Image (cartoon, rainbow, N blue to C red):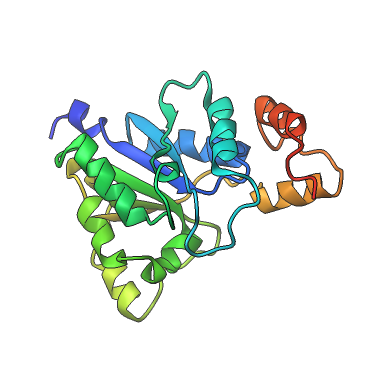
């Protein structure tokens, strides 16, 4: 595969983004440089299968992503999970993406290390790597699982970053990025208590939150 083909990899960053914040955005930039990939799509989850439904609508969370990424041409917001009824299963989104981009382009699913450790609780989890690679963002002190089915599954697929762009799917790569201790949970707590989240989220997102009176209860 040529250098131009390798750089054509598509990264997909899924999550609730409730709300999207500067930690998400900085991680996304560094991922594009590290993998490398030509574009990254933020894919907001409409109805997460493994956690309580967000109190903010999926459309509002997507609107905040659009505001946050304005001006960065390598970023986009993929709303396919907002169009489907029922739980937002990642395997369904990956299948849909493969139909869109074809079978030869490298597709890299981005997640946090905590999500990776719980991967065996995902719907049809053993089929995920048939559609994509996984790039997991490690926190300090993170370790691979040491035993069990998931440990064996991940260990056999461990890959370096260049290997993810050399083939369409099948690898698992762990990367450490610049640590920005910002969490959406912390931001919601600040806003619910009447404090400011300025400089934790982009200014346009901060304005949107206040205009729409989000996270006030």
On screen, residue 61 versus residue 3, left or right, reads right
Q: Please, is residue 154 above or below residue 56 in the view?
A: below
On screen, residue 49 versus residue 125, left or right, reads right
Image quarter where the N terminus lies is: top left
Q: Residue at x 73, y 27 (%)?
A: 207
Q: Please, is residue 79 above or below residue 72 in the view?
A: below
- Asked which quadrant contains residue 38, the reply is top left
Observer able to see residue 52: yes
Q: Residue at x 43, y 20 (%)?
A: 73
Q: Residue at x 82, y 38 (%)?
A: 196
Q: Residue at x 28, y 74 (%)?
A: 152
Observer able to see residue 35: no
On screen, residue 90 versus residue 64, left or right, reads left
Find the residue positioned furthest to the front. 85
Tell me where residue 167 appears, x and y as whole percent: 17, 45
Foreground residue among 56 and 193: 56
Q: Please, is residue 168 above or below residue 88 in the view?
A: above
Tell me where residue 95 appears, x and y as whole percent: 25, 49
Foreground residue among 194 and 179: 194
Tell me where residue 55 appears, x and y as whole percent: 65, 51
Tell me where residue 54 appears, x and y as whole percent: 61, 53
- Asked which quadrant contains residue 57, the reply is top right
Foreground residue among 143 and 60: 60
Q: Please, is residue 100 above or below residue 187 in the view?
A: above
- Asked which quadrant contains residue 20, the reply is top right
């Amino acid at each position: 595969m040529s250098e131009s083909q390798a750089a054509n990899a598509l990264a997909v960053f899924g999550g609730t983004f409730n709300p999207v914040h500067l930690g998400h955005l900085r991680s996304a930039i560094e991922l594009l440089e590290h993998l490398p990939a030509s574009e990254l799509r933020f894919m907001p989850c409409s109805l997460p299968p493994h956690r309580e439904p967000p109190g903010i609508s999926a459309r509002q969370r997507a609107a905040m992503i659009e505001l946050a990424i304005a001006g960065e041409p390598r970023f986009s917001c993929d709303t396919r999970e907002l169009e489907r009824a029922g739980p937002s299963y990642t395997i369904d989104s990956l299948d849909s993406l493969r139909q869109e981009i074809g079978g030869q382009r490298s597709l890299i699913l981005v997640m946090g290390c905590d999500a990776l450790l719980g991967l065996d609780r995902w719907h049809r989890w053993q089929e995920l790597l048939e559609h994509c690679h996984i790039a997991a963002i490690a926190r300090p002190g993170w370790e691979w699982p040491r035993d069990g089915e998931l440990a064996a599954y991940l260990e056999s697929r461990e890959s370096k970053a260049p290997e993810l762009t050399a083939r369409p799917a099948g690898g698992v790569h762990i990367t450490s990025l610049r640590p920005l201790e910002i969490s959406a949970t912390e931001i919601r707590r600040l806003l619910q208590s009447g404090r400011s989240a300025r400089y934790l989220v982009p200014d346009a997102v901060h304005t949107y939150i206040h205009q729409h009176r989000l996270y006030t209860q």
